[in-house]
Amino acid sequence: MGHGRSYLAELVRINDTLIWSQDRTDSFVAAVEIIRDIMGARLAPTYLQDEAGNLLVLVTDDQTRDALGPHFATMPAHEHVRPPWINPQEWPVSAADHLADPAWALLPDDFKAWFGESGVVVSIHADGRHLGAVLLCFDGPWALTTTRKEFLAAAGRILGNAVYRWQVAGRERELGALEERRRLSDELHVDLSQQLAALGLHAGVMQLDAAARDVDRLVADVDHLEQLVSTANRSLRHQMLGLRTDAEMVKGTFVAQVRCHLDNFERQFGIPVTLECTGDADQVPLAVAAQLIRVLQEALANVHLHAHAAAVTVRLLPTSTRIRLEVEDDGNGFDPTSVPDSRLGVRIMSERMQQVDGVVQFGRGAAGGTLVTAEAPLRRAGSAMPSRVGVAS
């Protein structure tokens, strides 16, 4: 009972540390430090999954970061986010119990050097999502007793609830930013049209003044022309900033990026994915490709979390004027009207497609699962994806 009471008090302290601190990163690191102290670990580096689920990103103090070195600032998710280190119950896992498993042999040697044969993976999770893990590293043998396992499972849930809460707040900000970006984009389109019309009218005025050989008016015309061009440049700069953000996210050809996301999803969750592509989907403009990639990520996340699917099919169906993305699973189906307001994924997918004059729809697939369809026109300005593959498939 003594251990139980002390562990309960420490769980309360961990929770309070995460709630009351003003800085999320500092409070998270402080909460993990409590866990490290209680368990007597030498190190407790924490890795959180990035938004795409491809990387594990180190979140820790400077001392631990220096001990691991720059090579471990990130790690590929597919090497670590898999059984036995991650299990459906999200229980802590001791390396000592799995030294004979192929999963231990497959871990990189430099990782095993600091993690150690007594290392423990403490899952960080919430709302059915695996979000990352605390890696407890010990100097010698360390037993993961039932009491310790229960404490670490509860601590992982508390950490996960905090991370998930912060992620939801971030998604709400993302949705607001998308809505604001669409509003500004609509205004800029109107503004640019008006500016181009003004430039055309002014060119006609200059022709008349030139024909009349009115030098004074021509000088004034040139000054006014410079002002019109400067204003148009500012508007175009706003548009190009958005396009540059899209270009930074989508590197390589569009099809290669889609295939990369599907390969990572299949490796991480063990759900087979089939990619069907007709036509030349690599001619999709950057702005459209970026939003389709985001919709694909969101749809795959929903498959993992909610669909209970055994297989997924992704289709890219381009025509000369439109691009259509379909994500179909054979799971338990989906009713978008039943989704609570706290689920922002559907709203964000819709908002993203509106950015490029597109639409997203949800329905039933041929096997009774969910069919997510995102479609957008290809008439938007913007360069197509580069012809060379920049990401290994």
Image: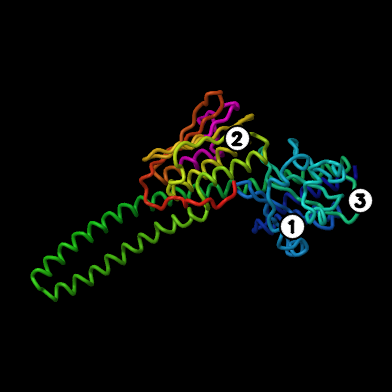
Judge whether residue 306 is colored magenta: no
Residue, x 23% and y 56% (percent of image)? Answer: 197
Viewer-nearest residue: 134 or 126: 134
| Residue that extends furthest to the left in the rendered view of this protein | 212
Instruction: Compute the Cα span from label 2 to label 1.
Output: 40 Å
In the image, 155 versus 261, the foreground residue is: 261
- Residue at disc 2, secondary structure: strand
Q: Quadrant of the N terminus?
A: top right
Disc assigned to residue 273: 2
Q: Disc 3 marks which amino acid?
A: Pro
Disc 1 is placed on an element classified as helix
Question: Pointer 2 and pointer 1: residues touching (CB < 8 Å)?
Answer: no
**Part of the protein shown in magenta:** 327-350
Q: Secondary structure at mark 3?
A: loop
Nearer the N terminus, badge 2 or badge 1?
1
Q: Which residue is mark 3?
A: 141
Query: Residue 297 location in percent, x, y?
Result: 56, 42
Q: Residue furthest front?
A: 388
